[in-house]
Amino acid sequence: MALASAALATAASTTHAESTSYPTRPITVIVPFAAGGTADLIARILGEAAGRQLGQTLIIDNRSGGDGTIGAQLAARAKPDGYTLLQVSTGHVILPSLRSDVGYDWQRSFAPVFGATTVPQAIAVNGTSQIHSTADLAAAAKSTPKGIDYASGGAGSISHLTAAYLVHALKVPAMHVAYRGLSNAVQAVRSDQVLFTVVNIPDVAELVKAGSLRLIAVTSPERLPQFPDVPTLAEQGFKGWTSSSWSAYLVPAKTPPEIVDPIYRAYSAAASDPDVKERLRKIGVSIQPMNGTELGAFMRKESTRWRSVIQENQIKLEE
């Protein structure tokens, strides 16, 4: 009994010593999206600054695939020692309402640490299209028996759900076409295979400026400085509706508070850095700072909201 007690005491002492000296080696940030996209850029800009705060390098590990589930599953299985973080997005709270085999439970598998950024969305049509507003979209849909086709970056993605909400609110016939990634959905719009899609503005800003795409509405509460002539959905009659693609950071469940706290403080300081803010602003990203408690409440609210959209529109993943 004495040996067992001594062993437990030694183990507890060792764990405490490890946590109070945290971090002593590089930290891996799993980004469940491909390199080069907006989510990846956010992770690298914030990770570089947070790493300076922690005195260690934050290694960005891109694990794309499975609508973000592959990276999330990997992080859920990681040791809760603070050396594995997971960057999540809107899709991670949407997917569990669409399928039961995601391989993780975001409320039980992880602990929220820091709410980081938001990316505005917009309704986009071909730059040569005669569609200039959501009213034009409705008119186009009603002018043909089969209605209109719209694209998304994948069934169940936020671009899909936002578009589904729009056609439901317009009460028009429409067919959803899911593509592998938003870039393919954008290409489908540019080649007139479909009439519209919902985009993350940073991903298409240059195409809009070049005239290849036209934005007919933004989903933010107010018009955006970079596209001041594009009205909001609210201005076009969709009162109270906003949407955005957000990112946040989680750690595996049961990570000790004394390890979570320095991670939060590092990311919070990074998000307050004027240089970081400016670098993110240039790619169309806004800081949305939240602590772990605020982030958990926000994610639960988002989950409830999108579940309602899914149920109202009878959306299924295989669509």
Image (cartoon, rainbow, N blue to C red):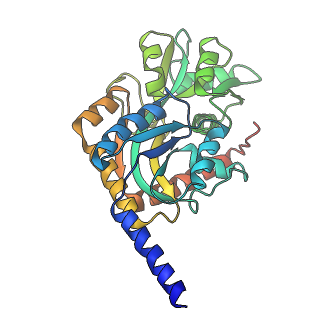
- Residue 156 visible in image: no
Q: Is residue 194 visible?
A: yes
Q: Position of residue 312 (x, y in %)?
A: 67, 48
User: Would you identify the image quadrant in which residue 119 lies?
Assistant: top left
Tally of numbered discs: 0
Relative height, residue 189 to residue 42 (above, below): above
Viewer-closest of 108 and 211: 108
Near-viewer residue (87 or 315): 87
Query: Looking at the rendering, which quadrant does residue 198 occupy?
Result: top right
Residue 227 locus on image (x, y percent): 37, 23
Q: Residue 296, percent across and down?
A: 47, 59
Which residue is pictured at 64% across the width and 39% down the height? 67
The C terminus is located in which quarter? top right
Seen in the picture, residue 265 relative to 162 is either above or below; the reply is below
Q: Is residue 177 left or right of residue 124?
A: right
Q: Residue furthest front?
A: 3
Q: Nearer the viewer, residue 26 or 221?
A: 26
Identity of the residue drawn at 35% across and 29% down: 224
| Residue 135 x, y percent position in the rendering | 55, 26
Q: Quadrant of the N terminus?
A: bottom right
Name the one closer to the observer, 279 or 158.
279
